[in-house]
Amino acid sequence: MKMILLGPPGSGKGTQAKMISSQLGIPQISTGDMLRAAVQEGSPMGLKAKALMDKGALVPDEVVVGIVRERLGKVDCGRGFILDGFPRTVAQADALEETLGNLGKDLDQVISLEVDREAVVERIAGRRTCRQCGKMYHVKFDPPALEGRCDSCGGDLYLRDDDREETVRKRLGVYQEQTAPLIDYYRNKKLLCEIDGMQEIGKVQKQILSVLGC
């Protein structure tokens, strides 16, 4: 199964991708995770990406496409993959189609998670991340036992720059302008299925698996 999960920041696509990856035994390919790893390493690409991510802007296509192209060529993608957070623009979608063609592969399904804008702001702006182990919490939906402290390691919890409300709203604006057109792009290719992402996590997963024929 070769698929894409679309949805604005905070739509739950990362959570769903992990669950589906485990269920189907195929890798989740998250450009966000790969970019954050580069940021932590302090590489030139990571520093460039961080400056853009902190402002809520998109990382340049040449950086993201290069990362994804290399990843899709690895052995564990032979049985399929779940792209989470890529493509983000029609240009990236075209580049992905070319990359897959060169690898002798085709997409099977594109799923778009539809969510309420204000609910997304609440979801993301309430996130807190442990500085020490990276575990994530939410001040309302998944708070730590002790405010400001990680349950696992006792580390300090903080609000990431790209999770701040003003940045979140800008990211949503960027999504609407540059990524939402992918809905029509994949609908025209008869690959798109839209699912209500505001439902309980288990119900969303069940609907996705049903669409995938699992």
Image (spheres, helix red, strand yellow):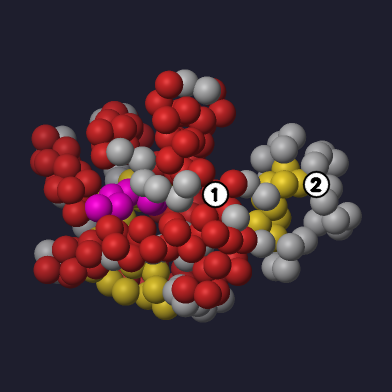
Q: Which mark is residue 150?
A: 2
Quarter holding residue 44? top left
Foreground: 155 or 111?
Answer: 155
Mark found first going from the N terminus, 1 or 2: 2
Looking at numbered disc 1 in the image, what kind of residue is underneath it? Answer: Asp
- For image coordinates 30% across by 46% down, the residue present is 80
Looking at numbered disc 2 in the image, what kind of residue is underneath it? Answer: Cys
Point out the residue furthest to the right here: 146
Q: Which residue is mark 1?
A: 162
Q: Position of residue 39 (x, y in %)?
A: 51, 30
Q: Position of residue 75 (x, y in %)?
A: 31, 30
In this rendering, does residue 21 appear at all? Answer: no
Image check: 76 left or right of 12?
A: left
As drawn, 167 above or below 180? above
Per the picture, the main secondary structure of the magenta-coloured stretch is: loop
The label nearer to you, 1 versus 2, is 1
Q: Report if residue 85 lies within the magenta region.
A: yes
Image check: 133 left or right of 155?
A: left
- For image coordinates 16% across by 63% down, the residue present is 185
Image check: 102 left or right of 64?
A: left
- For image coordinates 65% across by 57% down, the residue present is 127
Q: Which residues are magenta?
A: 84-89
Q: Report if residue 8 lies within the magenta region.
A: no
Q: Residues within 10 Å of mark 2 (few under 14, many from 20)?
A: many
- For image coordinates 72% across by 43% down, the residue present is 130
Judging from the image, what secondary structure is the residue with disc 2 in? Answer: loop
Q: Which mark is residue 92?
A: none
Image check: 75 left or right of 42?
A: left
